[in-house]
Amino acid sequence: MVIQQSIYAQQQWTDLPTKGSVGKDVHSQLVLIFGAKNHIADLGLRSQIRARYPQADLVFASTAGEIFDNQVLDHTLCTIAITFANTPTRCVISNIRDYPSSYAMGQCLFQRLDQPDLNSIFLVSDGTLVNGSDLIAGLNAENKKGVPISGGLAGDGDHFANTLVGLNDHVETGKVVAVGFYGDALKVYHSSLGGWDEFGRDRIITKSDKNVLYELDGKNALDLYKEYLGPFSAELPGSALLFPISIKTAESEQKLVRTILTIDETQKSMTFAGNMPEGATVRLMKANFDKLTEASAESARQIMQYANHRNLELAILISCVGRKLVLQARTEEEVWAAKNILGENPAIAGFYSYGELSPYTPSGRCELHNQTMTITGFCEKC
C-alpha cells in the first residue's frame, strides 16, 4: 500500500513523505479529501486535485475540522491518496433526493457494491439531509454476510447549515459516497469509544418520532432534561453538547451516544442526531475531559489488539464536532493520545463529523454514533 498525504492551507499545498512502496509507477486509485466546506466547493481546488491524481476516484466530504497526522486543523483541505497492492476498489454515489427514505438509499448502496469478495465498506454521508440511523439500518438490512462498514457524516463547522459530499465531479448536498474494498488481501479494523460519564437514573422513551423525542417515562422529555441541567438549561441548545444522552435499544450491542441538535419549546421536544425509538432506555451524560482523551487512546488500543499489534498502514480517525466544541483548546490531545498508541507507522488522517459510523466489535453490525472517537485501521500486510 502506498499513501500520499497533502494539505492545502493558506493558499498552498504541503506534502508529507510518501509511505509504502509497490513499484516505480504508482497511480493512486482512491483519494479521500476532507476539508472546510468552502474548499470542498471550490472548483479550482478540485481541478488541482484531479490534475495530481488523474486516474483515481476522488471522494469528498466537508468537515467540522480536519485531522492531519497529529494535528487538528480548521479551514484547510487534506487529501489521502491510496494505492493498494492487491485490493480492487469501487465507489458508488447516491442522492437522498432520489429515494423515498434514507433507509431505501442504504439498501441500494449496499446492493450496488455487493459482490462475493466484498471485504469492507467505508462511506461518507451528507450530515444534515440524510438520517444516519436509517441509512445504516438500510445497509445492515442488506448486509447478510456481516461485511464491516465504517465512516462518518460530513460536517459544516459549528454552523450546522448544510454539508457537501461528492465523488469525482459530483459534489453537492444530500449525497452519500460508499467505497467498497474487495478481495482478502486487505485487513480492516474498527473501534469507537466515547468517554462520557453517565449520571441520573435510567428512563424509558415513551413517545418519539424517529430522532425527535417527546416523552420519557410518560413525562415531558424537555422539562426533565432542563431539570437535570439546572443552570445550564438557560444556555440551551448550545449547552446540550456538554450533556449528551446514552441510549440502549434491543437491536444495539451496547449503549450508543446521542447528541441533541435542537429543542422546540412549543412542542416541548428535542431533536437528536440519531433515532430515539420508543421503548429504548436512556440516561443523561456529562463531559469528563480526561476520560474523553483516554477514550481516544483506548479506541486506538482496541485497534492494535484487533490487529494483533501488527503495523497498520492507514488509520482514519473520525471524531464528533461535539467533542471538539467541548474540548476546545484541548482537542488535539485526543488525536495525540490515539497517535501515541498507533505509533509512527500508519498514515493518520480524518475529520470532525456530525456522526460516526462503526461496529462496536470486529464482527458486529455498524451503528451510528455521536460524541465518539471512531478509528478505522487498514493494512494489506497484516
Image (cartoon, helix red, strand yellow):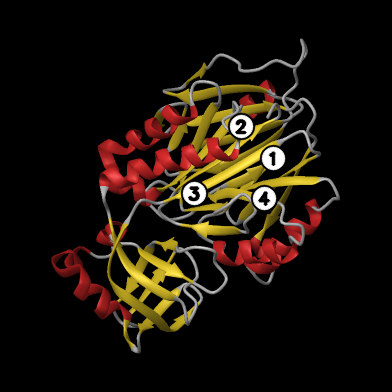
Left or right? Give the position of 104 relative to 252.
Answer: right
Q: Nearer the viewer, mark 3 or mark 2?
A: 3
Three-letter amino acid code at disc 1? Asp
Compared with residue 332, is residue 174 higher up or lower down, i.e. above or below?
below
Tell me the kind of residue under disc 2: Arg
Mark 4, Cα crowd under 10 Å, few <14 / some 14-19 / many 20+, is: many
Query: Left of 269 or right of it: where is 93?
Result: right
SS at badge 3:
strand
Q: Is residue 267 visible?
A: yes
Which badge, 3 or 4, is on the more N-terminal residue? 4
Alpha carbon of mark 4 to alpha carbon of mark 1: how far? 27 Å
Does the rendering let one see residue 40?
no
- Ranked by sequence position, the earlier of labels 1 and 3 is 1
Point out residue 359 in the picture as x, y percentages from the top left corner. 58, 54
Residue beneath disc 1? 169
Residues at marks 3 and 4, CA–CA distance in whole angstroms: 13 Å
Residue under numbered circle 4: 148
Mark 1–mark 3 CB contact (< 8 Å): no
Residues 167 and 153: in front is 153
Quadrant of residue 65 within the rendered picture: top left
| Disc 2, SS | helix
Seen from the viewer's position, the closer of residues 341 and 158 is 341
**Which residue matches tag 2?**
46
Label 1 SS: loop
Amino acid found under the numbered disc labelled 3: Ser
Question: Which circle's residue, 3 or 2, is located before the other in the chain?
Answer: 2
Q: Which residue is mark 3?
A: 192
In three-dimensional space, the C-alpha distance between marks 2 and 4, rounded to whole angstroms, equals 30 Å
Q: Earlier in the sequence, mark 2 or mark 4?
A: 2
